[in-house]
Image (cartoon, helix red, strand yellow):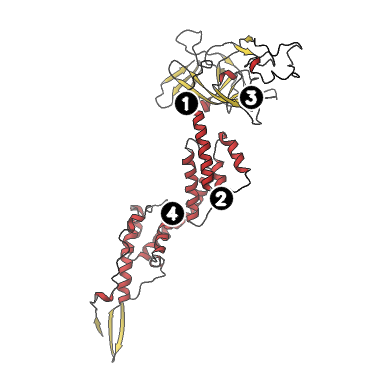
Amino acid sequence: MAFTFSSSSSSVSSAQSPFGNLSNLILVKLDKHNFLLWRAQYQQLLEGLHLFGYLDGSVPCPPMNVTTKKDGVVTSSINLDYLNWRTQDKPLLSWLLTALKEEALATVVGCSTSHEAWSTLCRVYASPSRARLMQIKHDLHHLNKGSKSMTDNFHKVKSLSDSLATVGHPLHIDDIILYTIGGLSSEYDSLVTAITTKTDEISIDELHGILLQHGLRLERQSSCSDITPQANTAMHKSQQPQDRPFSNTRGRGRGRGRDRSPNALGFGSSSPKVTCQVCGKIGHSALSCFHRFDLAFQASNSPTNSKALSATHTIDTTDNDWYPDMGGTHHLTSDLSNLSIHNPYHGNDKIAVGNDTSLDIYHIGNTVLHTPICSFHLKNILHVPAITKNLLFVRQFCHDNDVVFEFTDFGFTVKDKHQRTPLAST
């Protein structure tokens, strides 16, 4: 049997390799966490180039040699189809290896064809990827905007939903909307209601635009609140000795279904408050009372001949301190003048107190408390005229001002969260 080798290069496909610039098209390199995305990216590209058959085995490797028999003589020669196949497969294998990170590259050492390398990668990473698929769904269910911008939050949802779509688990538009608005804070409640009750279909781009505009509006309101001074609610020095800049007065309060601290600590000293002559409530004058034009209204604690529209008002030396509250959900105040920016409250929530009664919420707003060292921002304050103490929700206060509270037997200290520098103390 004779063996021959054809040296004619014209017999072997000399078409220019398509792999010249393909490495620039692969943006994600394979590691143990991203196999689903990596495979979808790689497979789509190679299918478009009609090369994926080399990887999945649908274009198998031809025999290396072919034999012919002529005049009783059997001749073996190199199979030109084999050479053409290798001309495509070897660059494809090389390109595949460049799309792997070091840990993934170690799993395909010794693979001689792109099909062998591809099969190894699928076998090694397919099972963990099922866990990754469940993780993506878990992340969607537990999304929370938190301190992220609206754009970043939206892109997070979009990225996770795209990840599911690329691996054959696309989400319906309603599910994407649900996941997007599900992680928003209470500041977006009105917008969420408008979106969920909307009868017309809404696109992803339209949803993004609506959320972005609402987020920008909230940021503008917050920035206005941050630069607005409010002397009436400033944390101020008490009438105690100068080495104790804040008072250690004690009081009791309750709010929003939670028991307040029985020994709440107050900022500052007591100061006079206005009592309305129309309704008898503390925190506003007759000129700003909701009932000032209601001729049929009669306050329970005022005589029939009460001068409801009188511009004069009485002074009540009610405690105007702010008391740290560990168990609530919002800052509470009875004095509307404590809010530098406020809007009427249109919700249905009430403040639950210990005697099984509920107190109405009239306004919600923001303010700034000043100290000789710095200023503290109070956001989402609920105006509850019937509350007896101004309550400072510690958790929100610490979050908004990046501080921590340290309580001792003698009082408390407010410190910078990172530097641990004292900013205020009793």
Residue, disc 4:
37
Q: In the rendered structure, which amino acid carries the disc numbered 4?
A: Leu
Which label was assigned to residue 173?
Answer: 2
Where is 104 relative to 211, above or below?
A: below
Q: What is the C-alpha distance between the residues marked 1 and 3?
A: 25 Å
Residue at x 48% of width, y 25% of height: 226
Pick whichever of labels 2 and 4 is earlier in the sequence: 4
Please state if 404 lies on the left or on the right of 118 as rendered.
right
Q: Are marks 3 and 4 in contact (CB under 8 Å)?
A: no
In this rendering, the label closer to the viewer, 3 or 4: 3
Which label was assigned to residue 362?
Answer: 3
Q: In the rendered structure, which amino acid carries the disc numbered 1?
A: Asn
Q: What is the C-alpha distance between the residues marked 3 and 2?
A: 38 Å
Which label was assigned to residue 222?
Answer: none
Residue, disc 1:
401
Q: In the rendered structure, which amino acid carries the disc numbered 3?
A: Tyr
Residue at x 49% of width, y 13% of height: 236
Residue at x 24% of width, y 82% of height: 3
Pick whichever of labels 3 and 2 is earlier in the sequence: 2
Position of the N terminus, as image quadrant, is: bottom left
Q: In the rendered structure, which amino acid carries the disc numbered 2?
A: Ile
Residue at x 53% of width, y 47% of height: 204
